[in-house]
Image (tube, rainbow, N blue to C red):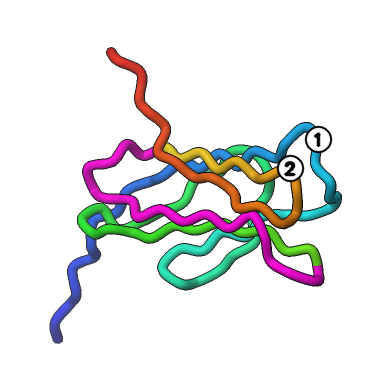
Amino acid sequence: MTSAQPSPTRRVELTLHKPWFALYGRVRPTLVIGGLGQPAQWGVGTWQLPADDTAVIGVFLFNRLWRFGRAELALEPHHAPALVYRAPALPFLPGRIRVQPQPAA
């Protein structure tokens, strides 16, 4: 019987920002990692990803009629483990996701 070695993982922090003024309400973000969607909350959250593979991370908003605020990023293993998503103020614009630069030590 052969036991499979678990692949190494890393933790990624994602901050989801809702604009202070938005023309939509009660909308929550959905996070998509590797093609699998999962509901998320506004604010800071952490997710576990493979440490040695590129992970495609996407976020979109859904208001019962259509999806909007879509943004996507391919997170490479050498990228900093912190991302920031900014939702649009209008429900027909795209969102923005970027790697948050790490402060110099």
Q: Outermost residue toward the top? A: 105
Q: Nearer the viewer, residue 91 or 50?
A: 91
* Left or right, residue 24 beside residue 3: right
Q: Amino acid at mark 1?
A: Phe
Q: Nearer the viewer, residue 40 or 71?
A: 71
32 versus 25 height, above or below: below
x, y percent for residue 10? 32, 48
Q: Nearer the viewer, residue 71 or 29?
A: 71
Q: Outermost residue toward the left? A: 2
Question: Are discs 2 and 1 less than 8 Å apart at CB?
Answer: yes
Gap in Å between the C-alphas at discs 2 and 1? Answer: 6 Å
34 versus 85 height, above or below: below
| Quarter of the rendering occupied by the N terminus | bottom left
Label whose residue precedes the other's in the sequence (2 or 1):
1
Residue shown at 60%/53% (left/top)? 94
Q: Residues within 10 Å of mark 1 (few under 14, many from 20)?
A: few
Residue 67 position by quadrant? bottom right
Q: Which mark is residue 48?
A: none
Q: Which residue is mark 2?
A: 89
Q: Which residue is mark 1?
A: 21
* Left or right, residue 61 beside residue 80: right
x, y percent for residue 93? 66, 52
Q: Is residue 75 magenta?
A: yes
x, y percent for residue 40? 64, 54
What range of the chain is rendered magenta? 64-81
x, y percent for residue 8? 23, 56
Q: Is residue 42 magenta?
A: no
Residue shown at 34%/59% (left/top)? 55
